[in-house]
Amino acid sequence: MICNPVIPGFHPDPSFVRVGDDYYIANSTFEWLPGVPIHHSRDLAHWRLIGHALPGLNLRGIADSGGVWAPSLSYADGQFWLIYTNLRTCGMGRPFKDIQIFLTTAPDILGPWSEPVFLNSIGFDPSLFHDDDGRKWLVNMIWDFRKDHARFAGIVLQEFKNGKLIGPMTNILAKNVLTEGPNIYKHDGWYYLMLAEGGTGWNHGISMARAKSITGPYELDPQPSVITARDDATLKLQKAGHGELVQTPAGDWYLAHLASRPVGKERRCILGRETCIQKVEWRDGWLRLAAGGTRPQVEVPVSLPEHPWPAEPVRDEFESLSPHWSWLRTPVDMSLQERPGWLRLRGRESLHSLFEQSLIARRLQSLQCTVETCMEFSPTHFTQMAGLVCYYDTRTHFYLRVTHGGKLGIVLTDDGRYDELGDIEVNWPRYFLRAEIDHERLQFSASPDGRSWQTVGPVLDASKLSDDYGQGLHFTGAFVGLCAQDLGGTRQPADFDYFELK
């Protein structure tokens, strides 16, 4: 049985591919590195992270929720193909989007991945369709910045051959709704165009169109959506949309899509947009949910032999660096060798910086969890600080920090507004730091020995760490992690003995 979400936490825009008996999903990472996580499954129910397709990206200066949007993973001609967008300009009220679309390939899902090839800048959410006659086509949305024009100006198609785009660019479908995330599939002599519609929020959904020729004309599915939660606010899985298809060796079809789980009276989705899977089937020439209707299901039957993976350890002792760690925009100034068994972070810029932070974090994947670490840190100036952070983006995060003078307290950045809550003075050789999250409740605490704990600050609203809070574009999810700052530029180190997330 598939229990959704199959990949919890910030894993949006799933791209789905099967090679033999192996299934892979790639996801968007936006400003986070390494780029594009790859998860692997043998049964569609159990998934494990095996690596990243874009480990060496430089996203220096990229705005919050910019960066790597909607990668598309495919397999053809004995190799993997990955199309991705690097969106450099984004934000509410901005007419322009400075976009770079790239292609990289690899003989194996673990790489090595080739040097990315630039394709175009016409829009975002591209995918590559491999036709059965050997031809390849880039399909994409087109962005229109002009006054009095729809920003989402249609779906365009162009042939890809010998490493570059050739021939005319054809607008194959334009609708008067937000239409993006196009993918083409061929089934029973028809070309099917799958689309993400209605934006990425509560109105999200997936629609279809079909044509006998890849260039059209395309007729719309008489059923407006294949899947959506827009008509039922009581569903556990909300914002369902943006998906891709695979077919099993037995002929069954499955749809990977994103969805979010709101909590609290504000209905905020702390874990971001997560990856889910639905069973689908073809009825009367159109794709439909096997369960009937259009609503995403939490439990989905699957007939593949069960193939679970070993459980992940809850504690990282920093003997090596787990692939579950992420960082922002540029490589972190860190070391596991300078003090074996400890993670050393050298302080860099503030948590508001778009350039060089020393922050290493993991996706929050449960609405009930405890995060704990042990830190040694000897700051000599008020510009030096380090500690435990619960992070959404540069505008919204909660930070339990230690700074000069043995001051231990909480710093808030709440939708861009900076505040400090109740520093206390302690004189500890080590700082044990903890964050306890229970849905929308967040409580920090600290200890000198890891046994006797005292709360630090009030209960905080964890639901602010979500797409649904604040102003501007929000496309990521909540992270918990470790960080160090040295605003004087001397790179004062902070050492962390372990990180526990349970």
Image (cartoon, helix red, strand yellow):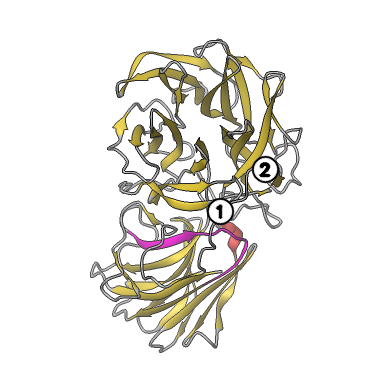
Magenta stretch encompasses residue 147: no
Q: Amino acid at mark 1?
A: Gly
Which of discs 2 and 1 lies nearer the camera? The answer is 2
Q: Residue at x 46, y 87 (%)?
A: 448
Q: Could you say which disc has been placed on residue 9 in the image?
A: 1
On the image, the x and y values in percent for residue 352 come to: 39, 58
Locate residue 405, reporting x and y percent: 36, 84
Label 2 to label 1, Cα distance in Å? Answer: 22 Å
Magenta highlight range: 357-371
Circle 2 is placed at which residue position? 302
Pinpoint residue 26: horizontal percent, then vertical percent. 47, 42
* Front residue (pair 401, 434): 434
**Tag count:** 2
Query: Which residue is found at the position 52% from the left and 52% from the top?
Result: 477
Q: Is residue 243 above or below residue 207?
A: below
Is residue 143 something one can see in this rendering? no
Is most of the magenta stretch helix, strand or loop?
A: strand
Looking at numbered disc 2 in the image, what kind of residue is underneath it? Val
Q: Secondary structure at mark 2?
A: loop
Mark closest to the chain's N terminus, 2 or 1: 1
- Can you tell which quarter of the image residue 370 is in? bottom right
- Does residue 218 sit above or below 255 in this rendering? above
Q: Residues within 10 Å of mark 1 (few under 14, many from 20)?
A: many
Question: For the view shown, which residue lies furthest in the left direction?
Answer: 490
Residue for point 48% across, 43% down: 27
Q: Is residue 490 above or below residue 414?
A: below
Residue 175 appears in which quarter of the rendering? top right
Q: Viewed as shown, does residue 113 lie left or right of 26? A: left
- Relative to 220, is 40 on the left or the right? left
Checking the image for residue 255, the label placed there is: none
Residue 370: within the magenta? Answer: yes
Q: Secondary structure at mark 1?
A: loop
